[in-house]
Amino acid sequence: MKHPKISVIIVTHNSEAYIRQCLDALLRVTYKPIDIYVIDNVSTDNTTRILNTYKRIHATYLTKNIGFAEANNQVWNTIHDEYVCLLNPDTVVEKSFFESPLAEMEKNPRVGACQPIVYLLKDKNTINLTGKKTHFLGFDWIAGYKTTRVPMQQEITSFSGSGVLLRSSALRDVGFFDPSYFMYYEDSDLAWRMRMRGWSIMFIPQSKMFHDYKYMPEKGGLHFSEKIFFNERNRLMTVLKNYSLWTLILILPAFLATELGLLVVALLQGWFRAKIRSYFSLFIMLPSILKKRSLAQKQRTAQDRDIGQGFETAITFEKFQHPLVRYIANPILKWYWGIIRHII
């Protein structure tokens, strides 16, 4: 029986509260052909001291915080295993974590990524996520949040970088993370690009892990306005890069109306400056975005009509349920996508 090697990549930054239990769980898994790579983004706590106590990991210590996307890329450029597993440092995997997704990928060579089921670390019966949902205007959110019913194994639209098994040949085909994202949406962008090249993404409920998920940054961590900035800039960048020109023209009225609504909400809720900043950053990055867009469009083998079948028409994540979203935006956008999806 074939036992392909798996490279596990963990990016840390001030992760002293979690990294030990993450690594200890990995070292107990029943699938043994794994190499563990940890790359530290300039931690100022005891993270590096803890990492130095482990002899079976490959640790790299950066002198500058280059973000989640580029840190993963740096490790990826140095490894040659058939599969890559990404894990957040605040996760814990079960002993049999690797067997089921690996079996699925060995059976089906067009599966580029497998998403395990992720439970909340502090409430192990409640689901954190079963993948990610993508709205046709680029918004993304985690699927299955705070539910208890486990979905069946199935193809999904997108995965979470907090824990996913990736096929190395798929990454060589489409490229890994776009480093300009720094953090947030880099996983959704990668999933979108994989599907543009005909790779499928599977949800595997037999593979289980736990995540200390927090929607809002903790005190002392990333400021909320920074999270808004990266989320909004990167969402817009993903849409601009990955849709065809014809689809961009078709969604433009809905896109402009939604952006106007977001500006109103931002003004009312105090993140207007972060939203405006995302536009300026996007404008500065536009030449680079257009180059990446040109390459992605030349390489695509799947059309927007096929990819868009998995997109959401309503924004349903509980954290986004502002009255303007629930009672105005969602009904209008659902109606609009229902029309244009047939002419994409």
Image (cartoon, rainbow, N blue to C red):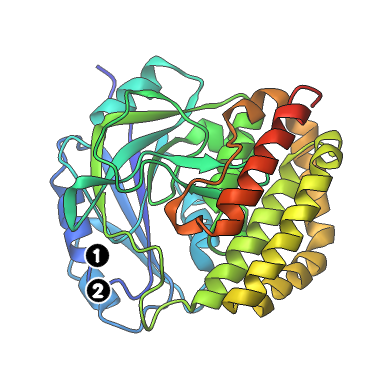
Tag 2 residue: 16
Question: What x and y, as percent, mark residue 324?
Answer: 61, 57
Q: Amino acid at mark 2?
A: Glu
Which quarter of the rendering shows the N terminus? top left
Residue 150 lies, with reference to residue 281, above or below; the image says above
Residue 278, x across and y down, in percent: 70, 69
Dot 2 and dot 1 residues touching (CB under 8 Å)? yes
**Horizontal side, residue 178 vs residue 299: left or right:** left
Whole-percent x and y of residue 45?
Answer: 29, 82
Residue 106 can be seen, yes or no: yes
Q: Residue at x 56, y 54 (%)?
A: 185
Quadrant for residue 16, please give it: bottom left
Q: Residues within 10 Å of mark 2 (few under 14, many from 20)?
A: many
Q: Depth check: give the residue in front, 32 or 130.
A: 130
Q: Is residue 135 above or below residue 153?
A: below
Name the side, left or right, on which 57 lies relative to 38: left
Q: Position of residue 341 (x, y in %)?
A: 73, 27
Looking at the image, residue 322 lies above or below residue 313 = below
The part of the image, by quadrant, that contains residue 99 is: top left
How would you rate the neighbour count of disc 1 (Cα within 10 Å): few for under 14, some for 14-19, many for 20 or more?
many
Q: Secondary structure at mark 1?
A: helix
Residue 67 vs residue 128, the one in the foreground: 128
Q: Quadrant of the C terminus?
A: top right
Q: Residue 181 or 46: which is nearer the viewer?
A: 181
Residue at the spot of label 1: 19
Q: Is residue 302 visible?
A: no
Which amino acid type is shown beneath numbered disc 1?
Ile
Residue at image coords 24%, 65%: 19
What is the C-alpha distance between the residues marked 2 and 1? 6 Å
**Residue drawn at x 51%, y 20% as measured from the top left:** 110
Q: Secondary structure at mark 2?
A: loop
Asked whether 35 or 67 is in front, the reply is 67
